[in-house]
């Protein structure tokens, strides 16, 4: 059973999910697609997000996938159900694992959600939280400046600190005890967000929670990998291989990465080994 | 979709799982069987545990179950795979959710497991942990005095404090950073165990983790309940209804509980409404 787990994202944010899958399921092989050239998806119309996400999905379907993880909140909100209904393999999004973890964590039933315009507008987290537990009070906050900060590798900078502080100001008066990072890019700003919110607020990372559920579903379906050789992960990006390499090797603490350039759109081709 | 979730345990320990399912999935109805009269299962031979667990399962199968949760580590270790292979509905045990949560939590890959003789001897946690991540070092510890303390309602007592302190002594030199409560009775001793182990050790409760996975699997199978009326839980015990009521109402913080006596064994009958 040497099939791979496909992970797709609008850019490099989904690496937070991939990293957690690697840590929690070290025998699994991941094929990752980051649509860096067309990132961010957050402000795009739903039709475009749907089209691009299907393009990444189609590209990966030629490999022997056992599961597809949509590691992008915007894409999950827009197109998870449609992709799920059309593929034979399990398809996991990042919204319901985050929502479930928040319900497990909150003691006062007040949960905050940070997200992109697309995710917040879709109200996907609110729906998901209320479907499970309708007495949870949800406060959403759009953080439009976070993704560009991460994609431009500035997530350690003083500017990042300033932006995080300013963006989170509206949450300061709220009584939330749990905060969902409703975008897979945000865990790279996680330390700054935690510092800003203080110890009274537990921060939920979609990445960790989704990896946990990937593990549960693989186990449930008896498709967990038992191979003992080190897995051979592959990364595909629609943008610059060099920039992708720089961020991915920093985030994954791994210099040797198999990264390829891929062109998505009308012609699905890939080339330029790195 | 008003089917119920069956939860079975050797006694009242599985209430820690039931309570978490109620908290994390407040729309779901639970039918619980506690085999209090034959508790503890831990020291019993595997054949007996298998027989008793099948008896609880058969008893519940006459209801419209959508899922069965084996909320007893000993029974999970011995008979989960067999029951899983014979029922059409999803069957969830408490071992792999606990193992997965420990893998997510540990930073130094050193994990402790507290369990009954049966669970520890079966090495079910060790196998589960190593199947997922073989570099995790596992230290197991048998805690034979914990279940009787809980079943006799002494989990708040000074004796409990002394027993916990003495039992955990062998773990004091180890470098574990994560400790799995590998028996669903143990969370009732959770505060004492946490206090004894100190802040450097994260304590994993099977109950919380199993509830989380129940939620994930219901969601994955699209069988989550969307009813809005309060659920009508039922509890069946092979032992004293009064003692069961006393412990269950204390633990669930709910005085009005629908508890019935049930006789398991050759004749599967139930009677004596309470």
Image (tube, coloured by chain):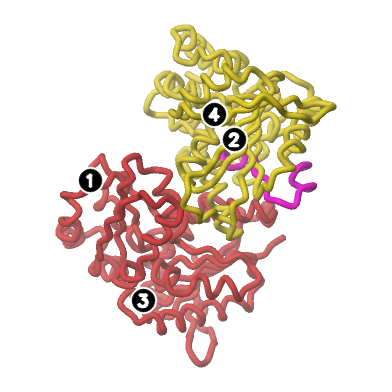
Chain colours: A red, B yellow
* Residue, disc 1: A175
Query: Where is B33 relative to A44, above or below?
Result: above
Q: Which mark is residue A41?
A: 3
Q: Do labels 4 and 1 share a chain?
A: no
State the CA–CA distance, disc 1 to disc 3.
Answer: 30 Å
Name the chain under label 1.
A
Write the residue at 54% across / 36% down.
B18
Q: Position of residue B157 (x, y in %)?
A: 45, 10
Q: What stretch is highlighted in magenta?
A: B81-99
Q: Where is residue A62 in the image (x, y as percent from the top left)?
A: 63, 78
Q: Do the residues labelled 3 and 2 touch (CB within 8 Å)?
A: no
Q: How many C-alpha atoms fall within 10 Å of the one at disc 4: few (<14), some, or many (≥20)?
A: many
Question: Is residue B199 in view from this perspective?
Answer: yes
Q: Are marks 4 and 2 on the same chain?
A: yes
Q: Are marks 4 and 2 in contact (CB under 8 Å)?
A: no
* Residue, disc 2: B234
Q: How many C-alpha atoms fall within 10 Å of the one at disc 1: few (<14), some, or many (≥20)?
A: some
Q: Position of residue B71 (x, y in %)?
A: 62, 34
Residue B271 within the magenta-colored segment of the rendering = no
Residue extending farthest to the right is: B266
* Residue, disc 4: B181
Mark in the foreground, 4 or 1? 1
Judge left or right: residue B46 versus residue B248: right
Q: Nearer the viewer, residue B25 or A186?
A: B25
């Amino acid at each position: 059973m040497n099939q791979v787990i496909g992970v797709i994202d609008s850019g490099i944010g989904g690496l937070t999910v991939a990293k957690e899958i690697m840590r929690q399921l070290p025998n699994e092989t991941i094929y990752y697609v980051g649509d860096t050239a067309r990132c961010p998806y957050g402000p795009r119309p739903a039709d475009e997000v749907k089209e691009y996400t299907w393009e990444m999905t189609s590209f990966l379907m030629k490999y022997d996938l056992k599961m597809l993880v949509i590691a992008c909140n915007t894409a999950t909100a827009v197109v998870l159900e449609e992709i799920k209904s059309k593929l034979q393999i399990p398809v996991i999004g990042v919204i319901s694992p985050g929502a479930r973890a928040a319900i497990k964590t909150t003691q006062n039933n007040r949960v905050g959600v940070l997200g992109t315009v697309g995710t917040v507008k879709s109200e996907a987290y609110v729906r998901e939280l209320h479907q499970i537990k309708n007495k949870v009070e949800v406060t959403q906050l759009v953080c439009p400046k976070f993704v560009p900060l991460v994609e431009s590798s500035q997530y350690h900078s003083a500017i990042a600190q300033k932006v995080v502080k300013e963006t989170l100001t509206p949450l300061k008066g709220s009584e939330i005890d749990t905060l969902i990072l409703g975008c897979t890019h945000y865990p790279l700003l996680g330390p700054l967000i935690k510092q800003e919110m203080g110890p009274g607020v537990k921060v939920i990372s979609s990445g960790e929670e989704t990896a946990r559920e990937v593990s549960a579903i693989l186990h449930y379906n008896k498709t967990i990998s038992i191979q003992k050789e080190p897995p051979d992960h592959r990364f595909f990006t629609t943008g610059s291989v060099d920039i992708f390499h720089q961020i991915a090797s920093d985030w994954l603490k791994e210099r040797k990465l198999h990264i390829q350039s891929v062109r998505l759109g009308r012609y699905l081709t890939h080339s330029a080994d790195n």
